[in-house]
Amino acid sequence: MVIPCYNSLQFLGATLDAVLAQELTPSLQNQFEVILVDDGGSDDLSGWVQQRGDDRVRVVRQENAGVSAARNLGIASAKGAFVAFCDSDDMWNPRAMAELYSCFDADPRIGLAYGFYEVVDAAGESTGRIRKSDIQGDVWEQFLSVNPVGASGVMVRSEVFDQVGVFAENRDRFRVDVEDWELWIRIAAVWRVGLTPTVVVRYRRHEGNSSTDLDSLDAAYRNMVDVVFADVDPKRAALRPLTTGKIAMILAWQSLNDAQDPQRAAVYLGEAAASAPELRRTAEFWRLRTAAAALSVAGSRGYQVLRSANGLKLKLKQKLSH
């Protein structure tokens, strides 16, 4: 298990407790380690771990280089046949490791396994949102337009990194990157993807991880498209316009939800329609147009009220389903 850390002690105790409390068979119980990668923080992570006194946990340190570099150092430091990832503020559910590991037993062609994730608030309380997916198997084409894999709820065969490489380190180019999604696509190009249809991780949303930079994301997404379509066969290359259009729609949603900018969202919608005209016939395209119009008419406060109402409906639905 690789956990990148940068002055992370506020939430790291709960994260580590959840990882170390995994319910595993006796044969697996002592067969995993947790690597905390200190990305040049100032919080004496090594001293904190020493006080905990658990020999399953070790710290490796690098000068501050960003989360991708930290994950890559963790990969290089890992000794096992599989590498799992969790961010320092998220929490694995008790059966997560066993559920993810079982995916590989089911099919030796699987290189990556993932599960659902639940979004919680800073206090660890559910927001009612659970990200589910049914994408598994040979999924390169599907991964081009959607990323269902949470970076905190994924396990990868170690040999996969030798074949396809590790996380791209683009911090000097993009303040906000999509390096995890780009790696999943690279993996899916040559390996099958496994899915356990259960919630494996609780993803904590708080002020420290809510930063958004649309200009950076725009550049990062375009770079991702360039990378994943480099040197592909003609059949795969033909999917580039549709992928470009779907990425534009993602940016349109982010323009609305993060930047409250309906004009920018409209520009992205125009790009989506120009890249792949068939997207104009999708429900998602028209939901975007409706949302952009609502923001233009109701303003930021009115739009937030609508979003909050939808969030409450989702949370109530989630409670009733339990």
Image (spheres, grey):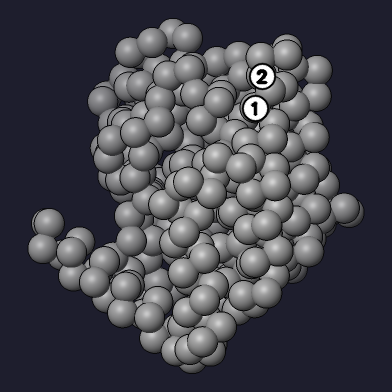
Compared with residue 88, is residue 232 higher up or lower down, i.e. above or below? Answer: above
Residue 197 as seen in the image, left or right of residue 179: left
The image shows residue 214 at horizontal and vertical percentages of 72, 65
Quick one: which residue is furthest to the top in this view? 108
The image shows residue 300 at horizontal and vertical percentages of 54, 87
Residue, x 53% and y 49% (percent of image)? 280
Decide: few, some or many residues near mark 1? Use Cα within 10 Å; few <14, some 14-19, many ≥20. Answer: some
The amino acid beneath tag 1 is Leu
Residue 72 as seen in the image, left or right of residue 288: right
The amino acid beneath tag 2 is Arg
Compared with residue 313, is residue 280 higher up or lower down, i.e. above or below? Answer: above
Residue that mark 2 sits on: 236
Q: Identify the element where label 1 is drawn.
A: loop
Of 209 and 217, the residue lying toward us? 217
Residue 270 as seen in the image, left or right of residue 81: right
Of 34 and 128, the residue lying toward us? 128
Q: Identify the element where label 2 is drawn.
A: helix
Residue 191 occupies which quadrant of the picture? top right
Residue, x 78% and y 32% (percent of image)? 227
Compared with residue 17, is residue 79 higher up or lower down, i.e. above or below? Answer: above
User: Pointer 1 and pointer 2: residues touching (CB < 8 Å)?
Assistant: yes
- Image quadrant occupied by the C terminus: bottom left
Decide: few, some or many residues near mark 2? Use Cα within 10 Å; few <14, some 14-19, many ≥20. Answer: few
Residue that mark 1 sits on: 239
The image shows residue 290 at horizontal and vertical percentages of 46, 69
**Can residue 55 be seen?**
no
Residue, x 65% and y 50% (percent of image)? 272
